[in-house]
Image (cartoon, helix red, strand yellow):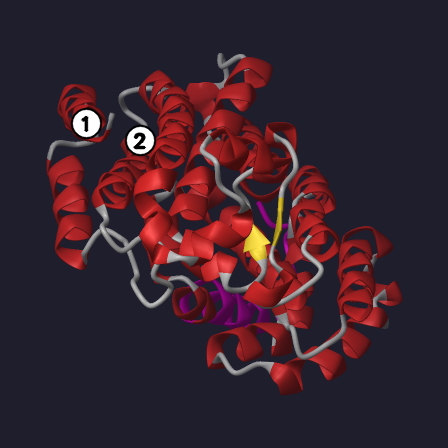
Amino acid sequence: MCRKLDKKVAPRLDSARHELLHGILKQVSRSFYLTLNVLPATVRDQMGLAYLFARAADTIADTDLIGREQRLRYLTQFRTQFSSGPAARRDMHAIQAALIPHQADSAERVLLQRLEDCLTLYDQFDPADQERIRWLMGVLPDGMTMDLTHFQGDSAQDLTAFQTLDELDQYTYYVAGCVGEFWTRMVCAHCPSMSGWDVKKMSALGVRFGKGLQLTNIVKDLARDLHRGRCYVPEPLLREAGLTPVDLLNRENLPKFRPVLMRLIKMAIEHLDQGWMYTMALPRLEIRQRLACMWPILLAGETLKRVAAAPDLLDPSVNVKAPRSVVYRVMALTTFTGGCGYVGTAYWGRLRKQIV
């Protein structure tokens, strides 16, 4: 929720809000924009702005034309913007000046240019919503820091892997699990029908939900990440299959890798099962929230089905994902049936059987 504004200021802020949460957000992520639009209006602005902040942090971390130490410093400076207040945000100009010239993606360049507007909108939220976003932006960049400190190179010649499953689990919490926790806190604060929810218990399910989505991204983008020097598959799992991270650069090793892949997919499914429990715990009349949760789970399932069967998963030129026709089918089916639990659960159940 936003504070009341001076009548002269309100129109300018409304215009900026529309540009940020519709125009720019739609450019940086069409898929999240669709999800955002279906959310209840009481949480739409907070979720949308939090996504833009997260995407900006990701852009800072991924601007590889700038040295790692500099990117780590800029990430730290960016975090401080959420606790420093409007008068102490001089670091933002330095971040923008350093990063904007290196953005090939026009949407990400515009996002960085409008960060001060994003922070102005953040300042208008009530203190409780500011605190929730501040908490998220204190945790989520830890995943980007892991990327920059654990994976020291940017190419296949510098390939490095996680050393333990715990590292992988920690990483998925930082970059996605904490989002499920943030999401739960925000909707419980603003949706009266959820006032009876056990926030701690449901936040834990929200964390599992986020981890499942991130594991889906990891197996989907495996080949491209390998060629960026990043192997998110822990080395012990590879050793069990008689493989090293470098072996995954050879597409001929896919059959040997497949048991490890299926183990990761099963881990993702187990997390997403908890995400489905989370979704079904939403009140039946919270149709918008149900849809916003059903869509990513079902589409993750469709993606995992294709990853499990892909004959060219280790080819970085191949993009394994659900086609747009499947995306529209999932959205239409769940929307036309009003987020019906029976229909959605049947769809999820069929997907699970096709995958594992």
Which residue is rendered at x = 39% and y = 28% of the image?
263
Residue 17 horizontal side relative to residue 216, left or right: right
Residue ID at (52%, 83%): 104
Residue at (13% x, 25% y) in the render: 343
Instruction: State whether the magenta stretch is mostly helix, strand or loop.
Output: helix
First in residue order: circle 1 vs circle 2: 2
Q: Is residue 67 above or below residue 21?
A: below
Give the percent coordinates (x, y) of residue 20: 51, 67
Q: Secondary structure at mark 2?
A: helix
Q: In which quarter of the view is residue 339 placed?
A: top left
Q: Residues within 10 Å of mark 1 (few under 14, many from 20)?
A: many
Q: Is residue 75 left or right of residue 14?
A: right
Query: Residue visible at 83% across and 64% down?
Result: 73
- Residue numbers of the magenta segment: 1-23
Quadrant of the frame with the C terminus: top left
Q: Residue 335's quadrant in the figure?
A: top left
Q: Which residue is mark 2?
A: 290
For label 1, the SS is: helix
Of residue 263 and residue 296, the one placed in the foreground of this image is: 263
Residue 12 in magenta stretch:
yes
Judge whether residue 9 can be spotted in this image. Answer: no
Q: Residue 74 appears at what percent x and percent y?
A: 78, 66
Residue 237 location, x and y as percent?
Answer: 51, 32
Badge 1 is on which residue? 344
User: How far apart are labels 1 and 2 at the CA level?
Assistant: 10 Å
Q: Which mark is residue 132?
A: none
- The answer to the question of whether label 1 and label 2 lie on touching residues, with beta carbons closer than 8 A, is yes
Amino acid type of the residue that numbered disc 2 sits on in the rendered structure: Arg
The residue at the far bottom in this view is 101
The answer to whether residue 5 is magenta is: yes
Q: Amino acid at mark 1?
A: Gly
